[in-house]
Amino acid sequence: MKYLLSQIAAVVGGKFSGTDCEVQSVVTDSRSLTCELGSGPMFVAMCGANHDSHDYIAQMYARGVRAFLTERSVEPLPGCGYVVVGNAIAALQCLAAYHRAQFKGTVVGITGSNGKTVIKEWIAEELPAGMKCYRSPKSYNSQLGVPLSVLMIEGDEQLALIEAGISKPGEMERLERIIRPDVVVFTSIGDAHQENFLNLEQKCNEKMILAHRARTIVYHSYYEPLGRMIAARFAERKLCDAAACPQVPEAVIGNEASRRNAQLVEAFCAAMGYPAPSFSEAPEVAMRLEVKDGINDSVLINDAYNLDLNSLALALDYLHNVALSRRRTLVLSDIAQSGLTDDELYGRVAGMVSRAGIDTLIGIGPKLKRYAALFDCDKEFFASTDECIARIGRRAVAGRAVLLKGAREYRFEKLAHALARKSHTTVLEVDLDAMIHNLNYFRSKLDFRTKLVAMVKAGSYGAGDFEVAQMLQHQGVDYLAVAFADEGVLLRERGITMPIVVLNADADSFDQMIANRLEPEIYSFRSLADFADAVSHAGEIRYPIHLKLDTGMHRLGFMEDEIERLCGELPKLPAVKVASVFSHLNCADMPEEDAYTRAQIARYDRMSAAVAASLPYPVIRHTANSAAIERFPEAQFDMCRLGLGLYGFGWEHNPGLRPVSTLKTRIVQIKRLEAGDAVGYGRAGKLLRPTVTATVPIGYADGLDRHLGCGRWSMRVNGRPAPIVGRVCMDSCMIDVTDIPGVGEGDEAVIFSAEPGNDLETMARVLGTIPYEIMTSVSGRVKRIYLKE
Ligand SMILES: *Cc1c(COP(=O)(O)O)cnc(C)c1O
């Protein structure tokens, strides 16, 4: 895009003031590096539910931004131009609709419950050579994501692929007005985001609004009732049912949903008159960015699925967030199909690499090598990925944050494998996007002034330490809480700078805590006196502490009859300053105990008010955990403590939350056994029929509870249940795959996931325990992998 700021004001009906200038890109996240891309970034400030980005205007000015779109008038800065609007998102939508109207190429809208990003990337891969195509980055498909992606269209592309996602009625109409697709591709229809719709028909009707003005519609009649509804409603349009396209053989693409996706891509190419694609495999290489531990204490960020300038900019942003104090290495391949001349393309890449503070560039491919002189960091070039794997120096990796960003034909997954820290094949995948979704779900229940503590004790309920904390810091959570000082020290060493509370602070670790700016929970007169001593020893004053009150749980904390003495002692201890005073509601998830909980909240209110009144400065009061946020809005006070909910579980089953963890492993051996045979220790797995078993390398030492053996739990293989046969061993167990066709060694077996029936709530019922216990039992030897859009 390229508009004068005054022109933007006219398009969106905003009030213009200050100096006019040319705008070529839009930035909404103040932490983004992409704003330096090109010459004219416009920063958009909005008042969100949880923060107000008008606070960042001065910072953006310091970084060189001169154009601002704001929701209220702000103090003018020299040389800047402003557009003031009532609602910034609505203004961006309006500007995007205008920009779309200027575009002469073909616009393809992609919607559906699942597979939007896969189909978009797959289509982009299969386009005729030499065609300039734009695709929306990642899954930028929301009310804000769609306008941002439409505004990134440069104008001379032949084709623009734009994803549209909705979560409630009314949203598609706005997206249709912006995208105005000439062609619409419908992917699958399923029950994702179903909670805001009355039924599936209503959701299908809403999605169909995207095709309101489209000439051509591609869909798959397998997905009912959508297929039937499209055929009836759009009878007069060019309708392409992908079910009519030839099926890719099962031997080439094993997964059924992927075979249907392949048909959708074929139907699209046919509808557009493009050559038929030839599929050699499904593009199921990590669709999302993966973060994991690398060799020599490095962190690997693997974003090897696709490569274009937009996705490179986003990945560099993410590297910047994760790297914190580490040095940065970028491993990059040549970029294909950009539609730009090589001079311009690699000139832009070099600018991005330099702005992202890359210390070392490893370039793979002939073009990068040719443009080597443009890069002013440490650099090394290889002709192929294999050569890089064979010769990459350990120094370029050791201790660093390493971003792998390669086009698909460069096969960076081999490189990722070579650079990953080796451990056994069982992994716990943690979905950071699901966690952000859950965080926002709970934030939406809180007053916007209410602060939030994220409970990351016990390695974030088993989900891992640093990456989760880093994400929460980035999301602007106010405090983290850990159980023991060691957990906090680890986070500090990795670069987490936000306030951290230690819940079980014992006197032996006070010095270490003070050295690392960790704030203790103080629950007794003894811990108060000891900590104040330690602070004085360290030569500090007014060190923040958090007072714990016992309002009925009887674990730790000051009792009500101790409050008067406590109020008397605090003023005599200048070494400490009370940052907050809190208590824990031990029955907030039990409706039958609500009378008790209400009395407990009243007691907390009384006790904490007395403490607060005795101090000459304000203190934060908090008592609600996840269940209380949902069930006792009156217990919000100044802050809430979010634990279980962040990881995707409510006090009762809540379809609005997304479980974040998936535990999976791979089959190492398959056996065909006779009826009458028996499997495992004690011959406990008696076979009543001829049975195919698969051995998987996960046992009770990994956290797979022994009580799940002998058929009490089923893993999932190819989406179907595979019951555990016989007893669970220490490091492995056997599962029954007789009824699942085509299972082979190396195939994935999922122990638990977000899938109904395979989920942690169901497992907890089988074991007679709670999801908390299972989550925190996954052993430390199971590697954690973090997934991110
Ligand atoms: C663990 C913990 C929480 C979080 O509880 P959830 O039920 O997981 O939300 C809150 N407060 C304290 C003191 C805790 O120890």
Image (cartoon, grey):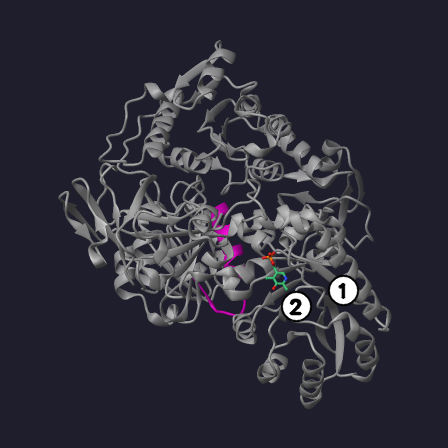
Percent from the top left, x then y, of residue 757? 42, 41
Percent from the top left, x then y, of residue 175? 60, 29
| 512, above or below 177, in the image | below
User: Is disc 2 placed on a helix, strand or loop?
Assistant: loop
Q: Which mark is residue 554?
A: 2
Rendering quadrant holding ligand 1: bottom right
Give the residue displayed 52% in from the left and 49% down from the top: 433
Left or right position of 673 against 784: left
Q: Which residues are magenta?
A: 309-329
Between 400 and 100, which is closer to the camera in this rendering?
400
User: Is disc 1 placed on a helix, strand or loop?
Assistant: strand
Give the residue displayed 16% in from the left and 40% down from the top: 690
Between 261 and 543, which is closer to the camera in this rendering?
543
Left or right position of 312 against 63: left
Q: Is residue 364 among the parts visible in the rendering?
A: yes
| 612, above or below 147, in the image | below
Looking at the image, the residue that sits furthest to the top is 236
Q: Earlier in the sequence, mark 1 or mark 2?
A: 2
- Residues at marks 1 and 2 touching, judged by CB atoms closer than 8 Å: no
Give the residue displayed 24% in from the left and 37% down from the top: 739
Left or right position of 704 against 7: left
Question: Label 1, on which residue?
Answer: 620
Residue 321 shown in magenta: yes
Percent from the top left, x then y, of residue 480? 61, 64
User: In which quarter of the view is residue 298 placed?
Assistant: bottom left
Amino acid found under the numbered disc labelled 2 = His
Between 150 and 67, which is closer to the camera in this rendering?
150
Between 423 and 346, which is closer to the camera in this rendering?
423
Amino acid found under the numbered disc labelled 1 = Ile
